[in-house]
Image: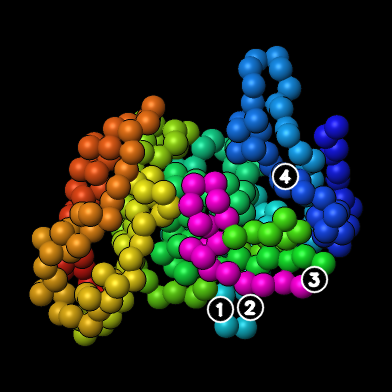
Amino acid sequence: MINHYVPTSLNDALKYLSTHDCYIMSGGTDLMVQKHVSSLVLPRFDKDVLYVGELKELQYIKEDKDGNILIGAETKYADLLLSPIVPEIYKTVIKEIASPNIRNMATMVGNIGNASPAGDSLVPLILNDAEVVLKSVNGERVLKVSEYILGVKKTARKNDEIIVEIRLLKQNLRYLYRKVGARKAESITKVSCLVGYQIKEKKLIDFRVAFGSVGVTIIRNLEIENKYKNIEVKDLDVDRVISDYYQLVTPIDDQRSNKEYRHKVAMNLLRKFLLELKGGIDE
């Protein structure tokens, strides 16, 4: 028998999780699709479901003393778009996620928990070293989003834990971003690329690249990034950067696209962004 539980507080939810292995559902925009069977048939679950979408204590957006943005786990995408303190790069990405109706229900934590390499918000989260706060009756721990997501649908969450907060760490980057899909917003991403950079006195003092939908997780490589930090922007070797990322981008064939197309698009986007960066973007 499958039980459905609706807690009235976070503590109530944590107590339930301490004794039950279950799915955690907020808006259900991912989970309900995954468990869909066919038209006119209710979704089929194989274990208990904990509904947390109405926990008001997890619905907030605020700034801490260090300038980091703290987002409660049940904050909807639509609320992030309206917030004056959410960094613009996240809004740019969110605007291309699904439809307004879905954004009124879906959460960024849902994207993280789903752990799909096609999760659009994961690209800026991982590029910007964002963190998640996990809580259980035994305490809490903090992980980078890149540490939390282990693979396709695989995460570091323990059965008794729930993500209660996302921390967007303060950044001083500029960004170049593009998502490629069959339609502008409602389609699942075929390829996405995000470049973050900071230039000071004509030197590239920070340089980051993240790709979505072209590997088992979001692709980011700190070793490659460090190679190009503190060099003169005019000395940036575009072909060398492309070569460094070429073998890391390992897309698959699926119903949305084929791996050859995805690989070519990913490399073309990176080249375009590097040329833009090198071509005289003002500090």
Which three-letter amino acid code belongs to the residue tagged 2? Answer: Asp
Mark 2 or mark 4, which is nearer to you? 4
Please name the amino acid that badge 3 sits on.
Asn
Q: How far apart are the two marked residues, 4 and 1, measured between alpha carbons?
A: 33 Å
Q: Nearer the viewer, residue 108 or 20?
A: 20
Residue 10 is situated, as x and y percent measured from the top left of the image, at 83, 60
Badge 1 density bin: few <14, some 14–19, many ≥20, Cα 10 Å: few
Q: Can you identify the residue that label 1 sits on?
A: 67
Distance, label 3 to label 2, CA atoms, is 25 Å
Mark 4 = which residue? 23
Amino acid type at mark 1:
Gly
Dominant secondary structure of the residues highlighted in magenta in the image: strand
Image quarter (top left, top right, bottom left or bottom right) of the C terminus: bottom left
Q: Are marks 1 and 2 in contact (CB under 8 Å)?
A: yes
Mark 2 neighbour density, 10 Å: few (under 14) some (14–19) many (20 or more): few
The reply to whether residue 270 is in sight is: no
- Nearer to us of marks 1 and 3 is 3
